[in-house]
Amino acid sequence: MTFAATVLTLYPEMFPGPLGTSLAGRALGNAWSLDTRNIRDFATDKHRSVDDTPAGGGAGMVLKPDVLAAALDSVSDGRPMLAMTPRGRPLAQARIRDLAVGPGAIFLCGRFEGLDERIFEARDLEPVSIGDYVLSGGELGAMVILDACVRLLPGVMGAASSGEEESFDEGLLEYPHYTRPVTWEGRTIPEVLRSGDHARIAAWRHEQAIRDTRLRRPDLTLRHGGAKQAPPSGAHDDNEG
């Protein structure tokens, strides 16, 4: 089954953009498909208007619900419909995995001051945010979600284990990685990683993931029920140098 992505945007020329390179680009047309639709094509007046001034006053313009609804209805087929908006639920890896095992998704990319709120009441739209900041539009957010989904599709990353033990999968940041040379600028790869003891290595990696999560993302530690415990192994921080 091909993962089918449809993007509703005022700037279809932005796609595939970076999604046309690297893993996602090589898989495009095989593991997944991409269709872009210009929201302006669904405007009904002679000026092809897609926005209007905010009710109640204020700066900027708001995308019109009738135009948005027509665009959504033209592609609605049971796939999840995601609206890219800073007012949405923060994106998490668990949601990415759910999307990646499905038939694909429809992305509605906001612009200007945002979307008329009535579109969320009238259509089954999931508001999604990729972070606590504001972009010029939802296109980059849609690209982020698509990249995160496509890399999880069967065969895209090559090795079946490539998507395992990644950051956020267990509510933790991923453990640190090392490669040759063994010693670089006086810093040496931790001895445990050179030991060949797979159980000890696994325990060390888990400890490092817990440590880094506590230091860098205490919000994740709180969200997932406090500090997780590493398995009893006697492993310790062998980071040398």
Image (cartoon, rainbow, N blue to C red):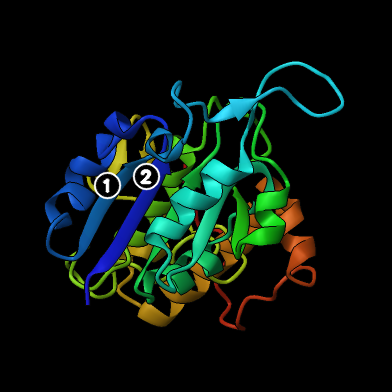
Q: What's the residue type where badge 2 is placed? A: Thr
One can see residue 84 in this view: yes
Dot 2 falls on a residue whose secondary structure is strand
From the viewer's perspective, tell me whether residue 151 is left or right of residue 174: left
Q: Residue furthest front?
A: 46
- Residues at marks 2 and 1, CA–CA distance in whole angstroms: 6 Å
Q: What's the residue type where badge 1 is placed? A: Val
Mark 2: few/some/many CA within 10 Å (<14, 14-19, 20+):
some
Is residue 222 shown above or below 142?
below
Tag count in the figure? 2
Dot 1 falls on a residue whose secondary structure is loop
Residues at marks 2 and 1 touching, judged by CB atoms closer than 8 Å: yes
Q: In the image shown, does 12 or 130 lie closer to the viewer?
A: 12
- Taking the spot 19% from the left edge, 41% from the top edge, the residue there is 20
State which tag comes first along the sequence, 2 or 1.
1
Mark 1: few/some/many CA within 10 Å (<14, 14-19, 20+):
few
Which numbered disc covers residue 201?
none
Q: In the image shown, does 4 or 152 lie closer to the viewer?
A: 4
Residue 113 occupies quadrant: top right
Is residue 135 shown above or below 94?
above
Which numbered disc covers residue 182?
1
Residue 158 is situated, as x and y percent measured from the top left of the image, at 17, 66
- Taking the spot 22% from the left edge, 71% from the top edge, the residue there is 2
Q: In the image shown, does 81 or 154 lie closer to the viewer?
A: 81
Residue 195 is situated, as x and y percent measured from the top left of the image, at 33, 69
Q: Which residue is mark 2?
A: 188
Residue 223 occupies quadrant: bottom right
Is residue 215 shown above or below 149?
above
From the viewer's perspective, tell me whether residue 187 is left or right of residue 153: right
Is residue 114 shown above or below 84?
above
Location of the N terminus (image quadrant): bottom left
- Taking the spot 42% from the left edge, 82% from the top edge, the residue there is 199
